[in-house]
Image (spheres, rainbow, N blue to C red):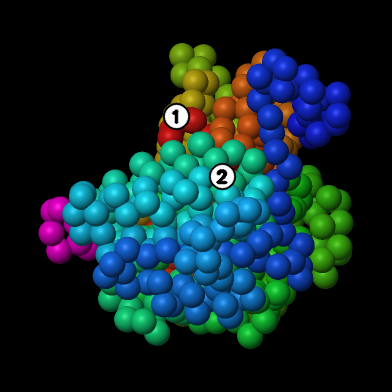
């Protein structure tokens, strides 16, 4: 589905009209192509006194080929102001609300200096890990700053808070944080903004080639015949994965086309069939001997307000979107087909966070997916398997094409980027969570919603 308004706004006539009438102005977002530099310009890295992350972050940035700007040179500039691809601030030294002034001092002079589709990243400590209530309070305050910058800077600039646990030490932090920084700085995270991402201390390994971060990994994608699932299969294959693409037999032709295109295999299976988990487990065991990454993407909507909803609509949605995921996880885990270092990524929705009129069944199932992540992630930590969810907002697919025009247009614009996301935006985010290098990211629900106002 195309966003005609966004295309119009990119034209000369469109630009003039948008300016005159103060209409929403969706920027063209920077999206990833293999070989792209991580950022469109240099990064400015600041740190408060006592911060523990500035050194590892500087190492990660230089290793990734990012030019680090010299803050003192910036202060002395008088003529052409410097423009940055990213502003990063290590706020882990902030232990009291009075220290928050450091953030103002760093960001205020640079508020107009970020290039279009640039990045703002604040690094902090998870409040629950802070030794004093004052520190926990100040660390929690960082969320408000980041979320407001996401709404304020415009032009496709995104802002995130990355909370890094203390227990990794400098070397542990380097490995655990690298994949997340690379993802957030790159065009892969084009439609992710206003997020708080928790990074743990261990479980990650660096790929040999960051252009193929999934090299050799066996990845199952459910619902792969179209929409987000088809984009996912393509992105994961591009990143080096061997993709097992699954969908219902009725979507067999489209599924085969996707699988052929990427050199993957196709599995025609209705996930709600009673024998689906065992048939899938047998297929994976026989063909590959394991599955490194399981992506539960298949999902359906059967919308009605609760009073008008028949029991079938309720049952189908809960079964496809939630119960089938549980049954498949159980069998794959019982048979130890997901090895140490494995990944489970489930697709939730902002409806599961905010609720939605006419979607009690869907929102229940998608909130359940978040519950699954919350409960399974700690249970699987010992086995070295990470579990995360993405919660897409308005994504341009057949699912959203069915929404009535006025509601659809409102859904598209009610976010900080004033546009709907593309299936590839969800796919890139799932890809990052699936990388072997992202093992320190578990138990997160990352919204891919352009910082939607719904459930914010
Ligand atoms: P889609 O309808 O385009 O694709 C879903 C795919 O899942 C289809 O190919 C379908 O055949 C498959 N599927 C459905 N039931 C199945 C079953 N029983 N067994 C096997 N496969 C089955 O949807 P989409 O927009 O690409 O959405 C993908 C996921 O993202 C879903 O979980 C959806 O809830 C979620 N999501 C989408 C949006 C959005 O804006 N499009 C927003 C939030 C969440």
Residue that sits furthest to the left in the current view:
132
Marks 1 and 2 in Cβ contact (< 8 Å):
no
Q: Position of residue 318 (x, y in %)?
A: 49, 39
Whether the magenta-drawn stretch holds residue 131 is answered as: yes
Badge 2 local density, few (<14 within 10 Å), some, or many (20+)? Answer: few
Mark 1–mark 2 Cα distance, whole angstroms, equals: 36 Å
* Chain-order first, disc 1 or disc 2: 2
State the image coordinates of residue 346 (x, y, percent, origin top left).
52, 54
Q: Residue furthest front?
A: 78
- Residue extent of the magenta highlight: 129-135
The secondary element bearing badge 2 is classed as loop
Task: Give the residue at mark 1.
Answer: 355
Residue drawn at point x = 28 percent, y = 50 percent: 100
Q: Residue at (76%, 71%) from the top-left corner?
A: 35
> Considering depth in this image, is 388 or 186 the residue closer to the camera?
186
Relative placement, left or right, of 172 versus 277 is left
Identify the residue at image location x=33%, y=78%: 168
Task: Decide which of 160, 389 is in the foreground and name it.
Answer: 160
Tell me: residue 371, above or below residue 210: above
Q: Nearer the viewer, residue 254 or 384?
A: 384
Q: Position of residue 66 (x, y in %)?
A: 61, 71
In this view of the protein, can residue 389 be seen by the observer? no
Q: Label 1: state its secondary structure.
A: loop
Q: Which residue is label 2 attached to?
A: 112
As for residue 184 lying within the magenta part, the answer is no
């Amino acid at each position: 589905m195309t966003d005609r308004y966004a295309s119009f706004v990119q034209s000369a006539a469109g630009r003039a009209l948008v300016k005159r009438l103060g209409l929403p102005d969706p920027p063209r977002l920077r999206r990833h192509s293999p070989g792209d530099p991580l950022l469109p310009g240099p990064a400015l890295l600041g740190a408060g006194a006592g911060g523990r992350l500035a050194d590892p972050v500087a190492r990660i940035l230089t290793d990734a080929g990012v030019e680090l700007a010299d803050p003192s040179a910036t202060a002395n500039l008088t003529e052409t102001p410097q423009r940055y691809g990213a502003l990063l601030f290590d706020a882990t030294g902030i232990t009291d609300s009075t220290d928050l002034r450091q953030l103002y001092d760093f960001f205020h002079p640079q508020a107009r200096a970020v290039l279009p589709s640039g990045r703002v990243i604040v690094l902090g400590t998870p409040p629950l890990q802070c030794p004093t209530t004052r520190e926990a309070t100040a660390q929690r305050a960082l969320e408000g700053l980041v979320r407001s910058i996401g709404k304020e800077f415009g032009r496709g600039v995104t802002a995130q808070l990355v909370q890094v646990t203390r227990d990794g030490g400098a070397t542990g932090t380097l490995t655990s944080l690298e994949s997340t920084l690379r993802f957030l700085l790159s065009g892969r995270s084009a439609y992710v903004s206003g997020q708080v991402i928790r990074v743990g201390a261990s479980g990650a390994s660096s790929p040999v080639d960051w252009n193929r971060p999934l090299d050799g990994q066996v990845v199952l994608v459910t619902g792969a015949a179209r929409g987000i699932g088809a984009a996912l299969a393509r992105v994961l294959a591009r990143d080096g994965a061997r993709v097992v693409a699954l969908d219902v037999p009725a979507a067999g032709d489209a599924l085969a086309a996707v699988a052929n295109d990427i050199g993957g295999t196709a599995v025609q299976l209705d996930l709600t069939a009673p024998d689906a988990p065992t048939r899938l487990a047998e297929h994976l065991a026989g063909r590959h001997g394991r599955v490194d990454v399981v992506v539960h993407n298949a999902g359906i909507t059967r919308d009605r307000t609760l009073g008008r909803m028949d029991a079938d609509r309720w049952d189908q949605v809960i079964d496809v979107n939630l119960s089938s995921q549980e049954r498949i996880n159980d069998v794959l885990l019982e048979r130890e087909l997901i090895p140490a270092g494995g990944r489970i990524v489930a697709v939730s929705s902002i409806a599961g966070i905010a609720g939605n009129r006419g979607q009690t069944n869907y929102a229940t199932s998608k909130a359940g997916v978040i519950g699954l992540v919350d409960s399974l992630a700690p249970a699987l930590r010992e086995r070295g398997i990470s579990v995360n969810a993405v919660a897409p907002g308005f994504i341009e697919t057949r699912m959203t094409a069915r929404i009535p025009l006025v509601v659809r247009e409102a859904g598209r614009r009610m976010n900080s980027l004033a546009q709907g996301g593309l299936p590839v935006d969800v796919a890139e985010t799932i890809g990052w969570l699936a990388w072997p290098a992202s093992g320190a990211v578990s138990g997160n629900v990352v919204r891919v919603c352009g910082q939607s106002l719904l459930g914010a």
